[in-house]
Amino acid sequence: MRALEPFVQEKIVTLGGRIILARESANLTDKQLARTLGVMIKTVRNWETDRAEPRGNKLATLSGVLGVSLDWLVSGKSEPKGNGSDIEETRALKVKLDRLLTLHEQTSALIFDLQSDLRKLQNRIDRHDLDA
């Protein structure tokens, strides 16, 4: 690992510090990371402040999303970055996931609108049947 500024070296002493460093290097906010991992933002903040630790399956996912080795994330040993192709592949997958999440939100909104329109139409039909 290249020489780091003293304040950065202090930051990576803990798991939480390494999560922050890797997240910032990946240009992600804590909210984006939480969304990508499917956890609450409070959970990510607890990890980053060393109030809690991610479970094993989340650690593995976290290392992949952040483009760092699991060994570095857990222990601070070895290089913080994976090889370039892994990082690029991770970023490409993140772009796809973000797009899918956006499409999911749009689809959910359309489903809600359709359900609402269908209820309104059914109410008109029911009222018409009662009048007839």
Image (cartoon, rainbow, N blue to C red):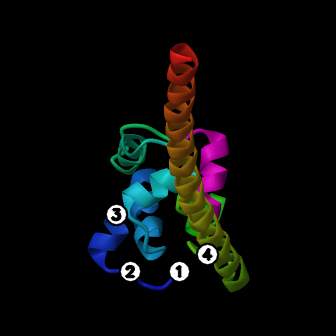
Residue pointed to by mark 2: 4
The x, y position of residue 127, in whole percent, is: 50, 21
- Which quadrant holds the C terminus? top right
What amino acid is found at the position of numbered circle 1 in the picture? Answer: Met
User: Which label was assigned to residue 11?
Assistant: 3
Residue 44 lies in the magenta stretch = no
Residue pointed to by mark 4: 91
The x, y position of residue 60, in whole percent, is: 66, 52
On screen, 9 above or below 3? above
> Considering only order in the chain, which callout, 2 or 3, is on the residue closer to the N terminus?
2
What's the residue at 42%, 84% (across, down)? Answer: 3
What is the CA distance from the residue labelled 3 to the residue labelled 2?
10 Å
The x, y position of residue 19, in whole percent, is: 45, 59
> Considering only order in the chain, which callout, 1 or 3, is on the residue closer to the N terminus?
1
> Considering only order in the chain, which callout, 4 or 3, is on the residue closer to the N terminus?
3
Between 38 and 78, the residue placed more toward the observer is 38
Residue pointed to by mark 1: 1
What is the CA distance from the residue labelled 1 to the residue labelled 4?
22 Å
| Label 3, residues with CA under 10 Å away: few <14, some 14-19, many ≥20 | some
Q: Secondary structure at mark 3?
A: helix
Q: Residue furthest front?
A: 132
Between 51 and 124, the residue placed more toward the observer is 124
What's the residue at 55%, 51% (across, down)? Answer: 110
Image: magenta residue range: 54-64
Cβ atoms under marks 3 and 2 closer than 8 Å: no
Between 131 and 8, the residue placed more toward the observer is 131
What amino acid is found at the position of numbered circle 4 in the picture? Answer: Arg
The x, y position of residue 108, in whole percent, is: 55, 47
Cβ atoms under marks 3 and 1 closer than 8 Å: no
On screen, 41 above or below 20? above
